[in-house]
Amino acid sequence: DQQVKQNSPSLSVQEGRISILNCDYTNSMFDYFLWYKKYPAEGPTFLISISSIKDKNEDGRFTVFLNKSAKHLSLHIVPSQPGDSAVYFCAASAGAGAQKLVFGQGTRLTINP
Amino acid sequence: DAGVIQSPRHEVTEMGQEVTLRCKPISGHNSLFWYRQTMMRGLELLIYFNNNVPIDDSGMPEDRFSAKMPNASFSTLKIQPSEPRDSAVYFCASSQGQDYGYTFGSGTRLTVV
């Protein structure tokens, strides 16, 4: 039972364009969402998060959008740079103070020069 | 701070052997997590500890897997006996609270032949 799903295993985007990574979840108890970025042979690193009381959070080139009614979130990267090529994981947790994160399968983003 | 330290980085072992993976969390972090990454299932939570106490081990596949956290600066994940299907990358992560996300180690790539 995959509670967090990233249906696109891979995505290829031209440098300078917008990258949009998508994530769907099934558990309505989830109230905190995060994106992690992972380079080969390294652990995932925290990128950006959003609480369910918001529908948008922005940090530089990265913006996360949350649509609670659709149980969908997305990560926008604008403009995309070659260094953004990595695997991106969506994660979610439920309940105040909860720390247990449920991760999606990941999407491999490739930025082409 | 050196971050979350995992050892070994790579482990190749024969089926039936005991395998022990080690983790040193970031000093001051009160939660520690063990995850397993596979192509099919992405990042799966195996077990997590709060203040050295196991909170949720529902992700531990079976009795062959066990984890301990004898003190705030050390944890082990043991597989006995190991099987080829245990081959994966095992990540340890630590956290000081939900709003801060996790800090992952670089992982241990386990191959059971």
Image: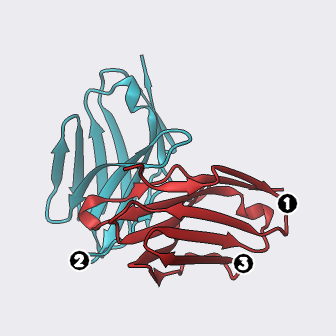
Disc 1 marks which residue?
A: B14
- Number of the front mark, 1 or 2: 1
Q: Most extreme residue toward the top, as rendered?
A: A113
Say what amino acid the circle numbered 2 marks.
Ala
Are the residues under marks 2 and 3 on the same chain? no
| Location of residue B15 with respect to B9 vertically, above or below | below
User: B37 left or right of B3?
Assistant: right
Q: Are marks 2 and 3 in contact (CB under 8 Å)?
A: no
Q: Is residue A2 visible?
A: no
Q: What is the spatial separation of the Cα atoms under label 2 and label 3, in whole angstroms?
A: 33 Å
Q: Which residue is mark 3?
A: B64
Residue with the mark numbered 2: A96
Q: Which chain is cyan?
A: A
* Real-space Cα separation, disc 1 to disc 2, in angstroms: 43 Å
Q: Taking A26 as reference, is B55 above or below it?
A: below
Q: Is residue A72 above or below residue B60?
A: above
Residue A89 is labelled as none
**What residue appears at the point 59 percent right and 70 percent down from the top-left corner?**
B76
In the foreground, B4 or A43: B4
Amino acid type of disc 3? Arg
The answer to whether A93 is drawn above or below residue B2 in the figure is below
Which amino acid type is marked by label 1? Answer: Glu
Cβ atoms at labels 1 and 2 below 8 Å apart: no
Give the class, few, some or many, for how many residues have Cα within 10 Å of label 3's Cα (few <14, many ≥20): few
Camera-side residue of B87 and A13: B87
Q: Chain of mark 3?
A: B
* Left or right of B64, for residue A91: left
Query: Counting other residues with Cα less than 10 Å from the Cα at mark 2, is it few (<14), some (14-19), or many (20 or more)?
Result: few
Chain ID for red: B
